[in-house]
Image (cartoon, rainbow, N blue to C red):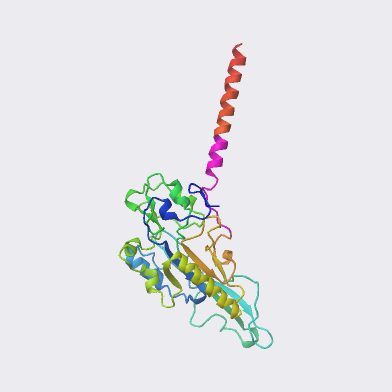
Amino acid sequence: MLPDPNSLYGPLDPAPEAGYEDAPPRMGFFTDTSVCIGCKACEVACKEWNGVPESGLDLLGMSYDNTGALTANSWRHVAFVEQPRPADVLGAPVATDAGPQFLGMPGSQPPGRGSGAEDRTDFRWLMMSDVCKHCTHAACLDVCPTGSLFRTEFGTVVVQEDICNGCGYCISACPYGVIDQRKDDGRAWKCTLCYDRLGAGQTPACAQACPTESIQYGPLEELRERAAARVATLHERGVPEARLYGHDPNDGVGGDGAFFLLLDEPEVYGLPPDPVVTTRDLPKMWKRAGLAALAMAAATVAAFVGGSS
């Protein structure tokens, strides 16, 4: 059964649905967090190419993560998630479900080096370069009253800041909390997947700068095949916790144009476990609101007629 082109959820090729004829293949990002080294080259490249204002040296008190989240001035955010791995009697790391733990501010030595061998604790860092997901069904597009947000021929979602009126509807509509308003002008800003570079046949700045190819750019279907093969390889190498996030066209947003390979649950990385496009139920809501309005009008007329007789 083919998907309903007017549906607000489910599998869909967004560019043709948006009216593009002979659209190129849908392009996107595959971020393999298993090879991310937290260098933040993607953050710097994004700011330099797109002219994103600097955020200042913001010491958040959260280890090496000085960005904190995706904001209007941080279109790429390299998250650092620190997890303890207690050592067994032989000194080998043992997996634990203790979850993220604060390691203190960065010092001159790696974490755990300040204590004696008997109290030594190993840690692992889960690093992830987060970005706008460029959803198949983008609620931000559905609620924008000015058309500032638009779907490109590559299937990505871009903000035209020159016609953004700063209403903020897109911010509350995004199921990932990606979009943000810039404090000095109130307009919404987010990753454009370097739309200007895509049109010239170039790779987005962040993927171009990534030294480990953690951020991979290309046709979305090819990236999904590549990601599935990578997960299978990690499982064979004894990493059973490797899983994909945002790759499934049947999920609550119809699949993401930017998806990830994770080494733990999505919540550990600050991602929603089961995102759903926030406008999915709008048709039902309007229908019910209409029925309620008709019922109220009928009750009002009945009361008026009954009172006058």
Q: Position of residue 91 (x, y in %)?
A: 65, 87
User: Exactly how many numbered labels are in the figure?
Assistant: 0
Membership of 133 in magenta stretch: no
Q: State the extent of the magenta-drawn residues as a range.
A: 274-289
* Residue 69 at least partly seen: no
Q: Is residue 288 visible?
A: yes
User: For the view shown, which residue lies furthest in the right direction?
Assistant: 89
Residues 257 and 55: in front is 257
| Residue 276 shown in magenta | yes
Q: Position of residue 229 (x, y in %)?
A: 53, 74
Is residue 93 depicted above or below 130 in this figure? Answer: below
Height in image: 150 above or below 219? above
Q: In the rendering, at what x and y percent does residue 268 appear?
A: 58, 66
Give the residue at the far left of this rendering. Answer: 200
Q: Is residue 206 left or right of residue 293?
A: left
Question: Is 143 left, or right, of 250 in this rendering?
Answer: left
Res 238 → quadrant: bottom right
Q: Is residue 116 left or right of residue 181?
A: right
Looking at this view, name the residue that lies furthest to the front: 1
Residue closest to the eye, 197 or 112: 197
**Front residue (pair 48, 290):** 290
Q: Position of residue 62 (x, y in %)?
A: 51, 69
Q: Residue at x 43, y 60 (%)?
A: 71
Quadrant where the image shows the C terminus: top right
Q: Nearer the viewer, residue 175 or 197?
A: 197
Q: Residue at x 45, y 47 (%)?
A: 142
